Image (tube, rainbow, N blue to C red):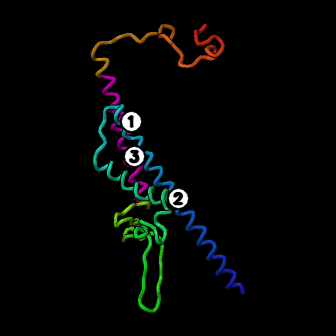
């Protein structure tokens, strides 16, 4: 009797942990997509160019993000079911298995492309961010250095800088004329 209870409880835990794992995978893929979207903006502002290799690693997580954002398309009978649904029929038993396939390095395979959601993959993303941060910082400082080499202009005091607010609480009351 206790074996039955343990088996049921273990099955429940397996389902729970499987769900938590998928949420973690999705969260990680969304975070990498955000980094992939924001890093080029910072790079452009600092005059730095992100390497193709780094871009490729960041973009390798896009299919996993898309998978979780559009799971309904991958259900059995849907247009992209072949990405995660496998059928086995040996004449005696017909099985439909839905889930990720992995390679020998435990990377998820979607359309036979590896997505590294392991500790290695996390470390690779951390290294990309760290490396690019250092390079962007150096590039930014170089831009500032070049600016000041063109001729030093004193920085005005805050009281000398014209300030025109985009929105004023007074504009509602005075018809937009300002006070």
Q: CA distance from mark 1 to mark 3?
A: 11 Å
Mark 3 and mark 2 lie on one chain; the one further toward the N terminus is: 2
Q: For the view shown, which residue lies furthest in the right direction? A: 1
Q: CA distance from mark 1 to mark 2?
A: 27 Å
User: Does 118 appear above or below 134?
Assistant: below
**Residue 167 is drawn in which quadrant?**
top right
Q: Residue 73 placed where, x, y %?
A: 46, 63
Numbered label attached to residue 24: 2
The residue beneath circle 1 is 42
Mark 1 and mark 3 lie on one chain; the one further toward the N terminus is: 3
User: Does 138 appear above or below 15?
Assistant: above
Front-most of residues 115 and 121: 115
Report whether 153 appears left or right of 7: left
Q: Residue 112 placed where, x, y %?
A: 34, 67
Dominant SS of magenta comes to helix
The residue beneath circle 3 is 36
Q: Indicate whether residue 169 is drawn in magenta.
A: no
User: Does 87 appear above or below 121?
Assistant: below
Q: Which residues are magenta?
A: 119-145
**Residue 14 is drawn in which quadrant?**
bottom right
Count of labels shown? Answer: 3
Q: Residues within 10 Å of mark 1 (few under 14, many from 20)?
A: some
On the rendered image, what quadrant is the N terminus found in? bottom right
Mark 1 and mark 2 lie on one chain; the one further toward the N terminus is: 2
Q: Residue 160 placed where, x, y %?
A: 48, 7
Q: For the view shown, which residue lies furthest in the bottom direction? A: 92
Tags 1 and 2 in contact by the CB under 8 Å rule?
no
On the rendered image, what quadrant is the C terminus found in? top right
Give SS at disc 2: helix
Give SS at disc 1: helix
């Amino acid at each position: 009797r206790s074996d039955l209870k343990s088996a049921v409880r273990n099955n429940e835990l397996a389902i729970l942990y499987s769900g938590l794992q998928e949420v973690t995978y999705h969260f990680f893929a969304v975070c990498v997509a955000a980094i992939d979207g924001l890093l080029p903006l910072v790079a452009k502002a600092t005059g730095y160019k992100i390497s193709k290799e780094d871009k490729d690693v960041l973009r390798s997580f896009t299919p996993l993000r898309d998978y979780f954002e559009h799971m309904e398309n991958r259900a059995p009978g849907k247009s992209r079911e072949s990405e995660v649904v496998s059928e086995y029929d040996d004449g005696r038993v017909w099985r439909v298995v839905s889930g990720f396939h992995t390679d020998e390095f435990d990377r998820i395979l979607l359309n036979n492309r590896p997505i590294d959601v392991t500790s290695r993959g996390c470390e690779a993303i951390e290294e990309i961010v760290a490396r690019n941060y250092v390079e962007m910082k150096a590039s930014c400082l170089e831009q500032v250095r070049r600016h000041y080499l063109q001729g030093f202009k004193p920085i005005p005091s805050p009281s000398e800088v014209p300030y025109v607010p985009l929105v004023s609480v007074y504009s509602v009351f005075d018809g937009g004329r300002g006070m």
